[in-house]
Amino acid sequence: MVSYLCEVMDVSRSGFYNYFDEKSIQKRAIKGGSDEVVKNIILKAYHFRGRKKGARQIKMTLQNQYQITYNLKRIRRIMKKFEIVCPIRKANPYRRMAKATKEHRTCPNELQRNFKQGLAGKVLLTDITYLNYRSGKRAYLSTIKDAETNEILAYEVSDKITLDIALDTLHQLRRRHSHIRNDAFIHSDQGFHYTNPTYQKLVKKMNLGQSMSRRGNCWDNAPQESFFGHFKDETNIKECETLEEVKQEVKCYMIYYNYYRGQWNLKKLPPAKYRQQLQQVA
């Protein structure tokens, strides 16, 4: 019977008996206990700051927050073994907010996808996304992101998608960040907020240049779109009951993202810490 089963399963008889050998059983038990220890350490990183993470985020969190180094292969093996599931990015269509009216003016694409120019505070990316929460309610999030460091420099949450949400985000940028370069410019899509004369006047008043993506081309502002994707995967906006709860969740995430969430392409550092390193070198 053993020979027949080994043939069916394509296993040698020696391998079959070795599997049930006392030494093999003890070895598996030791390995299982070791995996349990590693699992608990990985779960600490997985739940750090209340944000679920994938294998690469776990690796960076362990390294930056706990001074523990595991390779990705080991982390992924443990996650698979214990069914630790990471958030999966969901594809979202690129949404236009409105067609520009005749009085609105578009700007040329000065950026040309040259997002990384080696200088913090030079290339600023901005956009607005929707946030659905309980009872079919919707809020809107406007952000300004430093393309070099990925840091969110300013943001605004509102239950209205009027021009004010974009203007208030600019005002926050002016109040909070003095390290913006004199040759900085802000890049956006051709939404009505950014083609509006009032918005463009404020941009000039702040001594910023202005650049816009080509019509219907989301890749021209890909890093900003990528941030929104991660944001929606890693927050609990859908569980919020009120607009105030949405604002609090956004605030908590922005702190986590800027100061604690390591990024693979930023030397595994959080955006704010990476900016500090750039400024020290400069």
Image (cartoon, rainbow, N blue to C red):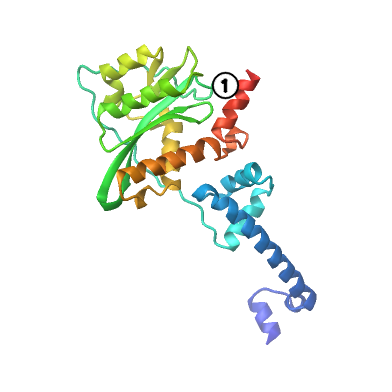
Residue pictured at 51% horizontal, 35% vertical: 258
**Residue 190 placed where, x, y %?**
31, 25
Total numbered badges shown on the rendered structure:
1
What's the amino acid at mark 1? Gly
| Residue 144 quadrant | top left
**Residue 30 placed where, x, y %?**
74, 68
Residue 188 visible somewhere in the drawing: no
Residue 151's place in the image compared with 131, above or below, is above
Residue pictured at 42% horizontal, 17% vertical: 110
Residue 270's place in the image compared with 36, above or below, is above
| Residue 119 quadrant | top right
Q: Quadrant of the C terminus?
A: top right
Q: Quadrant of the N terminus?
A: bottom right
Residue 244's place in the image compared with 279, above or below, is below
Residue pictured at 41% horizontal, 20% vertical: 174
Residue 267 visible somewhere in the drawing: yes
**Residue 19 placed where, x, y %?**
73, 75
What residue is disc 1 on?
118
Q: Is residue 93 left or right of residue 76?
A: left
Q: Is residue 192 left or right of residue 225?
A: left
Residue farthest along the right direction in this orientation? 23
Q: Is residue 16 left or right of residue 91?
A: right
| Residue 79 quadrant | bottom right
Q: Nearer the viewer, residue 23 or 237?
A: 237
Residue pictured at 38% horizontal, 17% vertical: 210
Which type of secondary structure does the marked residue at label 1 adopt?
loop
Q: Is residue 180 left or right of residue 236?
A: right
Residue 277's place in the image compared with 2, above or below, is above
**Residue 10 placed where, x, y %?**
67, 73
Q: Nearer the viewer, residue 231 or 66?
A: 66
